[in-house]
Amino acid sequence: GGGPGVGPVAVRSHLAPYLPNHPLDDAAGPASGPGPVSAAPYGSAGILPISWAYVRMMGGPGLTEATHLAILNANY
């Protein structure tokens, strides 16, 4: 928690009317749910290159080692 909202949103069908809509969608309006909750309706796209660069620099073995250390520290 607390980070930018970039991940996918998954809800059951009965909650779909409460999801934010997009002003460029032809069906957007009060009947289809609230408007966007941010000025960037597609999320924080500027964060994605930072995550990509981190994954590329660490590589598979580096990510595995970082994961092991994170779990070890969290359990300490």
Image (tube, grey):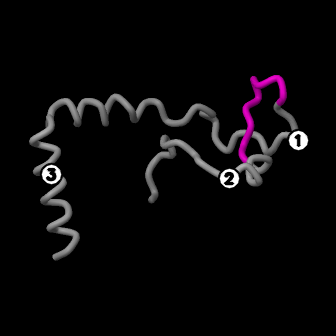
Name the residue located 17 percent from the left edge and 44 percent from the top edge: 63
Which of disc 1 and disc 3 is earlier in sequence?
A: 1
User: Does 2 sit above or below residue 37?
Assistant: below
Q: Which residue is mark 1?
A: 30
Mark 3 touches mark 2? (CB < 8 Å): no
Residue type at tag 1: Pro
Left or right side of 44 for 67: left
* Separation of residues labelled 3 and 1 (CA atoms): 45 Å
| Residue at the far right in the pictured view | 31
**Vertical side of 74 occupied by 12: above or below:** above
- Across and down, in percent, residue 18 comes to 77, 50
Q: Which residue is mark 3?
A: 66
Looking at the rendering, in which quadrant would you find the C terminus? bottom left
| Residue 23 lies in the magenta-colored region | yes
Disc 2 crowd, CA 10 A, few/some/many (<14, 14-19, 20+): few
- Mark on residue 12? 2
How far across and down, in percent of the image, does residue 72 sit? Answer: 14, 67
